[in-house]
Amino acid sequence: ETTNETYEPIAIADTASEEDLIWNISLQARIDAALASNEIYLAFQPKVLIQSGEIVGVEALVRWNDPERGQIPPDNFIRQCETAGRMSQLTRYVLEKGCLAGNAFDEAGLSIPVAVNISATLIHERQIVDMVAEVLDQTGFEPRHLTLEITETYRISNLDLAAGVLHELAALGCKISMDDFGVGAASLEALLRLPFDELKIDRAFISQMLVNTKAEAIVKSILAMGKTMRIVVIAEGVEDTGTLTKLRESGCIVAQGFGISRPVDFETILRNHNLGHSEALRNMV
Ligand code: C2E
Ligand code: MG
Ligand code: MG
Ligand code: MG
């Protein structure tokens, strides 16, 4: 079975042109060099209590500042890592930096969970369990403060396999979060069969909430479902006060989005344990 992780450049030799092959090898080299330097770093976006503005977690988001190509958008970069067979290396890097940042937040009196994004393709192999266990061991970060956000869950091709791996990750003490909930096929089946502690309502629904009654109904249903299932529900992509007010009225407790805070650097998180002064929260009535 061929997965992204076992990908070898030679495997595409018969289908891809020599040019593609050279591009791919140079891409691998660039990613390896970037991981070894500090061209790749993390930004942190707060998750806050709508009621008070208190930061109750941060999501680590990867950034690549390539000296030649400038800032490379994460979506693009993640795809490149998959193409180049470098998803494991990237994930390990983000896990390590995320846990170290978590330790530093702890020491500064901000004892909050740190969320790391994990591509769905990685949860088909036990290798990820060993990786997370090793990083927790090496860094000494508290497992209950590491949240694993599983992205693109529609790409989970084998739910039995994924369930086994996620149960092992949960057994390490980590929290498991379903990212971008609602978009992509089979997300309800994944919710039924995988051990999620948290789910994040995709921005596609949140951004439409005030103008589209269907979007509003979907958000309210997800909130009700999360409550019954005792799963924490987070609204992603909150950009304005109106949406935040509507979310609060709908019973949503935790939110994340540009209106509260953009992804920021480590020091900015340390300086602000509470974001009640943020644009969206300040104007709420
Ligand atoms: P995501 O995990 O759903 O992360 C949220 C994305 O939405 C971030 O984009 C964030 O900057 C953006 N966002 C947050 N609030 C708002 C808002 O109010 N409005 C708008 N328009 N956007 C908002 P970013 O950093 O570009 O990341 C994009 C995606 O790349 C992430 O989506 C995640 O799937 C992936 N990603 C990022 N870092 C990693 C990583 O370390 N590993 C993996 N596997 N994937 C990652
Ligand atoms: Mg995420
Ligand atoms: Mg998301
Ligand atoms: Mg996303």
Image (cartoon, rainbow, N blue to C red):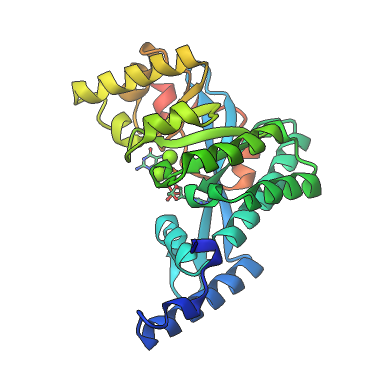
- Residue at 48% from the left image edge and 18% from the top image edge: 253
Quarter of image, res 35: bottom right
Residue 42 x/y as whole percent: 58, 52
Query: Would you say 257 lies left or right of 48 here?
Result: left
Residue 48 x/y as whole percent: 52, 27
Establish if 239 lies above or below 33. Answer: above
- Viewer-nearest residue: 281 or 216: 216
Residue 116 x/y as whole percent: 58, 44
Visible residue check, residue 16? yes
Visible residue check, residue 37? no
Q: Residue furthest bottom?
A: 18
- What is the count of numbered marks? 0
Establish if 131 lies above or below 215. Answer: below
Query: Would you say 150 lies left or right of 57 here?
Result: left
Residue 73 x/y as whole percent: 42, 59
Establish if 67 lies above or below 133. Answer: below
Establish if 263 lies above or below 187. Answer: below
- Viewer-nearest residue: 120 or 161: 161
- Viewer-nearest residue: 91 or 158: 158
